[in-house]
Image: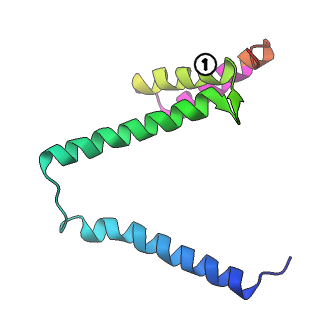
Amino acid sequence: MKATPLLLAGLGILAAGTFAFRLSGPVLRSRVTFPVPMARLLEVAAVVVLTALVAVTALTSGHSPAGYARPAGVLMAGLLAWRKAPFIVVVLAAAVTTAMLRLLGAALG
């Protein structure tokens, strides 16, 4: 498949926009300040958004429930991360938990 000039232009515009958006954080950090209540609200909002993302990813597979294996793996990862285990241990334990439960037939619930 040959890349068309319009596709390359769109890719360039998206790349430039992404770079500008990411650069705006360090550049504007000292110029933009939020009141303390708003800063706390933004911190809580970030946690809520990440929690929702983890919940949707862990509990669903497409438009159906994910079964028991994936949520158990995510739960294992969450517990180990909370206990401050090394990242590689968290990932491997979650993968092993999920794989073992799927091997035992718990994938579909």
Residue bearing the label numbered 1? 72
Q: Nearer the viewer, residue 26 or 96?
A: 26
The span picked out in magenta is 83-99
Q: State the image quarter where residue 104 is shown.
A: top right
Give the color scheme: rainbow, by chain, secondary structure or one colour: rainbow
Choose between 91 and 10: the one closer to the eye: 10
* Magenta segment includes 92: yes
Pick the quarter of the image with the N terminus: bottom right
Q: What percent of the width, then of the height, locates residue 88?
A: 55, 34
Position of residue 8 measured from the top left corner of the image (x, y, whole percent): 68, 82
Q: Position of residue 42 (x, y in %)?
A: 28, 46
Q: Where is the C terminus found, in terms of image quarters?
A: top right
Q: Quadrant of residue 59?
A: top right
In what element is the residue under mark 1? Answer: helix
The one of 29 and 65 positioned closer to us in this rendering: 65
Horizontally, is 1 left or right of 70 in the view?
right
Q: Amino acid at mark 1?
A: Ala
Q: Main secondary structure of the magenta part?
A: helix
